[in-house]
Image: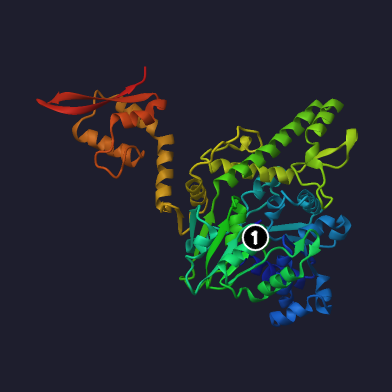
Amino acid sequence: MIVGGTGIGKSHYIINTLIKELVDEGEKVLLLANRSTLVEQHKVDVLKIKRPESEEEILEEVNRKLWIEFEGRVRIVTYHTLAESCTEYLHRYNHVICDEAHFIVQDALFNEKCDTVLEKLLELYSYGKNIIMTTATEFELIPHLWLYGVREENNNFRIFNYNDKHNWYDRIQLNFTSKRIADIARLVQEDAKCIIFTKKNKMKRMAEILGDADYIHSKWNNGAKDIEMEQKQIQLIKSHSFEEKHLITNSALDNGVSIKDKKVKTIIIDGVYDMVQIIQMIGRKRFDVDDEADKLQVYIITHHNEVKREYDKVLQELRMYTDYEIMLNKNTDEALIKFNDMYKEYFKVNHNKQPKLHVIGKDTDGITAKFFLRNSYLAKLGCQKDVLCKLNNIALNVNEFFTECQPIKNFININQNFANIFAEKYKHMSEVVIDKGVSKKYLEEKRTIQINRDLKLLDVLEEYSQKEFIALNELEAFKNRLKTEFGMGDKSRSKGISPSTINYEIKELGYYIDSRAKKINGKSHRVWIVNKVG
């Protein structure tokens, strides 16, 4: 697995070095991509290996003889095509390259083929095929692969992580806010451009509100191709830019399009709480390596009610998974009938004659109903639950990712908690800011203080409890340590710390501080005594 941030050259290396060398050696390569836009981009780039003409000429050749000739050695398709292909056909390829491999977990909530894709890749690997994965967001996929025995200690998996060596995070400022899209868009400089990610049903109206704006979404609409959207995608791939000041889009564009336009100074992401998706959306902007002034402001808009709805949906799916496990353990007709009755509404087909995807699938009806677990869907649920709980400052251990838990009535401090998550994971990020101007430095200080409280505070209290009293210079040093190292009192005030303030924070550790007057060298001084409760 090759891990590296968006825009550092993973695709360039794969196509211009790896695939070129393999093809020159007579090897056959299957290159997989997660979006049709990315497939088209890869076809353009691969054909340059064969004949380095202009992109316009190459695009015209894609469906003609040159591509047919080249496809005998390199085939570029979507993961969906892989899922539909017979294994015997796939065996003709010596190497399978999985670009944007996070697809296996990321798309599982709406793509029922994700488990099939992973199963076929594992089968090909068992037959000696070389499987190469690339991604900028590996942190959800790797634990999922572990469940299938794919891990470094088993000598069947290697990770080449370039994130610490090559990334663009030092050119990005993240802003977490609850402001409206239009209000943020007005902050964009007159000569600059902006990409806005939002829901499909908001796009047209938002374009009308902003003016000088265009919108683009998936070229597929309920199985039918939208010609207008297809043409917009082709133009975007070809030009790596857009003419209007604002481009409004959605997750259909979170992969497969590289915007190489230094005028793009702002990205607005509306109502997305998925870290993989956010990083991929930010990654549409490509930076000029030679221009350090080419920087990016990213605004992540949060909505408390949306977060709660997302969390409640995750809990409902996990409840379904729990009931499914109970049914399997009982292994009786009665248990199966009960489960079927409990969730029959979930398996009804929609107006497109397709049932909505859930963590549990169903392939027959009635008393003979057969249910199955969507493993990649479950993996994504666990990751979602982890992030959503962190948005309410709740930390989970791995064993709690897939279990039910109590509903959260109100989410508070979402912007600050979200900023904390990013500041901790992406330490190279230039700056992380929330609405009230709280910066990355403040967030890092808060995190250090929490670590100190968890690991050091009890030992410090134990040390001082051995003393008869604390006074004079030692008392001032003790107060200062409690302020700076453990974040107690009001740091903005010289006298902002008192025993009552401290006792409120240390009582759960079994200690309290008593303050009293005591004569020292004939003079009365205020001293502190650290006592154990009881």
The amino acid on which the numbered mark 1 sits, given as a three-letter code, is Asn
Marks counted in the figure total 1
Q: Which color scheme is applied?
A: rainbow
Q: In which quadrant of the rendered image does the N terminus lie?
A: bottom right
Which quarter of the image is occupied by the C terminus? top left
Q: At which x and y percent is residue 8?
A: 58, 65
228 vs 310, left or right, is right
Residue 202 is left or right of residue 492, and the answer is right
230 in relation to 466, above or below: below
In this rendered view, identify the residue nearer to me: 23 or 227: 227
Q: Residue at x 24, y 23 (%)?
A: 468
Element under label 1?
Answer: loop
Q: Nearer the viewer, residue 138 or 208?
A: 208
Q: Residue furthest left?
A: 522
Image: 525 above or below 209: above
Can the viewer see residue 387? Answer: no
Whether 356 is drawn above or below 87: the answer is: above
Q: Position of residue 113 (x, y in %)?
A: 79, 52
Horizontal and vertical percent position of residue 120? 80, 52
Residue visible at 49% across and 53% down in the picture: 177
Q: Determine whether 478 is above or below 524 in the image.
A: below
Q: Residue at the top extreme? A: 534
Q: Which residue is mark 1?
A: 250
Residue 360 appears anywhere in the view:
yes
Task: State the image coordinates of residue 428 (x, y, percent, origin top left).
Answer: 48, 57
Question: Is 107 or 366 nearer to us in this picture?
Answer: 366
Left/right placement of residue 175 relative to residue 327 reads left
Neighbours of disc 1 within 10 Å: few (<14), some (14-19), many (20+): many
Indicate the quadrant where residue 78 lies.
Answer: bottom right
Residue at 75% over, 58% down: 130
